[in-house]
Structure formats: C-alpha cells, structure tokens
Amino acid sequence: MTQKSKIDFKQILDHSHIANPYPLYAQFRETPVALQEDGSYLVSTYNEVVSLLHDPRISSDMRKSDAQKRFMQQAKQKREEMIAQGQQVEEPEEIVPAFIFQDPPNHDRLRRIVTSQLTPERVENMSSHIEQIVKEHLDKHAQGGQIDIVDDLAYPLPVTVICQLLGVPREDEAQFHAWAEPLASVLDPGQVQTEEQQKQIMQAGRQMREYMGQLLQKLKAQPGDNLLSGMMAADDIDGAMSPRELISTAVLLLIAGHETTVNLITNGTLAMLRSPELLERLRQDPELIITYVEELLRYDPPVHFRTRTALADIQIAGTTIPQGATIILVLASGSHDGQRFERSEELIPDRQGNEHLGFGSGLHYCVGAPLARVEAHIALGEISRRLIEPKLALDPPPYRDNAALRGPRHLPVNFKGLRS
Amino acid sequence: MRISVDLNRCQGYGQCCFADPSVFKLRGEEVLEFDPAPGDEHRLKVIRAAKACPVQAIYIGESYEEQEERSHRHE
C-alpha cells in the first residue's frame, strides 16, 4: 500500500523554492511514486517518468481525469443554479484542446499536420535570420553597462522567430504579449487558485482565439510562406484541421514560442556567468555549446513538470495508480536522478550520452525542440563570445511565478562592452 | 567521417534530420535514411545531430579512408 508521504507537491509551487527546486526534487526521489493529499501521484525518478511517458495507459487529455470531471460537474451545477435564480449566464465556449492535451489517434493527426509544415528545411532557413536578430539585439549595447538578458534578448528572440515562422505580424505582438503569461500559467496548478485568476485566464484565452481566428481568415485570403498558411492548406489521410483545431494549434505554438525558449537562454546565461571557468571554456571551444545546451536541458530545463491521467490502474514502483488519477511527472527531477546520471547535480558541459528529459520523451516530445536548439546555440554562443567581463548584477535573479515553465523574470548583467 | 546508427535504438524522433537535412532523412514516420560517409564539411552538423538524438543512437567515427590513411602513417 502507498503511504501518504511527506512528499508534498505543493512545495514545488511554493515560490520560496523557485530559485533552486533541485534539493526538493532529491527528497521527492526517495519515494519514486508518491500519493498526494488531493489524490494525485507525484512521479520523480528517471525510469518511472520515462516508463509512464511511453505507457499507452496514460492520457494527456485532462477531460479524462476524475479531478477535471468533478470540476466540470461543479461548474455545470453552479451555472444551473445561477440560471434558476434568473441570472444572465454566458454559454460556455466550446474549445478544442490543443494537441498536447489530446491522445492518439486525433493527437497524431494534428501533430502530423504541424510537422508536415515545421520541416528541417524551414528551420534551417531560419538560422541565418536568428543570427541576425541576436546580433541586432546585442549591438544595441555596444557601450556596455547593463543588459537584461530576458527583456533585451532571450524574450524578443523566440517571439520574433515564432511570429515569423507562423505568419503572425510582429507588430501585433504587443496585443498578445499580455495574454501569453496567464495562458501559460494553466500548466502550473499552483497558480490557478482564485476565481479572479481563472477569469483572467479565460478572458486571455478568448481574446487570443479571437485574434487567431481573424488572422487565419486573413491568411486564407492571402496565404504566405508560413506555418499557419501551410497548416490550413495541409491535407492528411485522416483529415485536414478544422477551423477550431487550427486556432487551438496556432495558440499553442505561439504560447510555447513565448514561454519556453526564453528560459533556456536565460538559464544558460545564468549558469555560465556563475562559473568563470565554464565561460572561459565556452569561449575557447565554440563547439562546446552543442553539448552545453543539451546539459542545460538536463540540469536547468525550461519545463519542469507535466501532468497526465491514468486510463487504467497502473502498477509502478510498488504502487498502484488508480484509473482516473492525475499523475504529475517531474521531468526536471528525472533528469537529476543520480541512478541514471553520474554526478547528476553537477553541470558538465561536455557530458556524453545525455538522454535528458528536457523536451520530454515519447509521442509528445517537444515539437519545437529543433528550433529551440538552434536559437539556444546561437544566442548562448554569442553571449559567451561577445560580452566583455560580464557579471551578474543579481544572484539569484527574480523568478517568474510559474513553477512548471520555470525561469528568471529578469537577468541583469553588467559588462564592459562588446567584442565584434 | 563515418556515421553509424543503432536502428534498434532509433525511435524516429527526427532530431538529426533538423541538424543536417542533407545527411539524415526520415522516410514516412519511422524509417531513417542516412549518408554513412558524408564529407568533412558536414562535421559540425553531424555532431549537432548526434548530440541532439534523444536516445543517443548516432555514432561518429572515422571513414575507411581515414582509417587507412592513419594506419599508413603509423607504418
């Protein structure tokens, strides 16, 4: 029988651990699969996380979890009560979940359509453009002084890239900038607490979908060489994307482009500025950036955990996860598992055989991984090469609230100028 | 440069195809096609491909010509 352990997921969500959650993960791993107070199961060891990610009995569709069913039932009841009292109640909007929240076979169809457009050639064509964007952003600081790695490079780079790739006009970014963060907070159960916050998320979602609907109309009339036009035109043996599916896919890709790569670049800068020796090695050996980025994805990844639902009773590590239970897979903890990685708590920039969980594993493996790699190679390579005597102005830096998509809100760095 | 891929490990993630589309190609969803002896100009891209492989199935070694040359040098 599983014991209700002291392993408490809520500790991850507690902001006091956000600058360094890894000691907490080490405690979690003493109980590979731990039942939580709310009936969910926390999974923190490498083998167990990987085995569940590849298990067809787990679902990414939250609508299949007992917790979500209860929540929907309560919402329905509340609506009915309000109607009975004669209040005006808005019809709930019918939303198609994005493909990361779906299972095969429909997930596979949607993902195939995305990957048919996000081709190696398209990503390769972006790389000279990425070099240009990085150069322009750094060149603004030729005199040295202070640069905020987040606001001045790590955020604008992936946003500019994803907008261009999707076919979203860059000048519209100001509009949806404010929607991305509340929408990404959905992945962090610790934040979705107050009714006010939920309202804000729903509203951001509605506005974002409206915006995308209008943009797709425009692109339908005037297609361009971009993902959204391609996805709209793409056919699949199991059927093309419906207009609702197009919208939820577009919103997902746009948010993912806003809320993840920024953390990879910022965490990578933070780590190299904490270690003068590492920074020097990266300068001496530009190829080291390749394994350094993989090691970052293991050591300090942008995505810390994802949730799933058990579709059947699942026996794992001496515990039975019952059907309908929510499973929290702590990817970042799996990647720190000392049973799987030697010197797991050390950052080893030339680590070999690095099968980290930074992009997940199995059928939901990050679809944007190749793009994130190119952006991180170029941005981190240029930061290490060009900044003269860079020093962290604050350590630890302030972090954003999201514990699932975790990273600094700002990373101010003082430096003396730029190499050309 | 010689490339070998452990096809028992390969899961068709396709990350190598992004790192060097002219050396690695995915046919359909699972079948990996690759050039086992690409020219030296591919060296950096092939290293990127090998390091990006989620199941670390790609091995880079010397081509037969490179091995020959080396053994001659040692004679």
Image (cartoon, coloured by chain):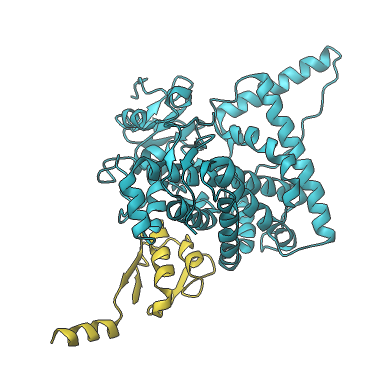
Chain colours: A cyan, B yellow
Q: Which x, y percent locates residue A304?
A: 46, 38
Q: Is residue A98 above or below residue B16?
A: above
- Left or right of A158 in this view: A216: right
Residue at x 61%, y 28% (from the top left corner): A69
Quadrant the N terminus of chain B occupies:
bottom left
Q: Which x, y percent locates residue A118?
A: 61, 61
Residue at x 38%, y 62% (from the top left corner): A287
Residue at x 48%, y 65% (from the top left corner): B19
Q: Which x, y percent locates residue A214?
A: 82, 48
- Left or right of A278 in this view: A266: right
> Visible in this render: residue A102?
no
- Left or right of B64 in this view: A78: right
Q: Nearer the viewer, residue B19 or A189?
A: B19
> Visible in this render: residue A78?
yes
Q: Residue B73 is drawn in which quadrant?
A: bottom left
Task: Count numbered badges in the picture.
Answer: 0
Q: Which x, y percent locates residue A222?
A: 83, 61
Q: Residue A352 is drawn in which quadrant?
A: bottom left
Q: Is residue A174 above or below residue A5?
A: below
Q: Is residue A4 above or below residue A181?
A: above
Residue at x 75%, y 46% (from the top left corner): A172
Kindly give the residue lying farthest to the top in the view shown.
A85
Quadrant the C terminus of chain B occupies:
bottom left
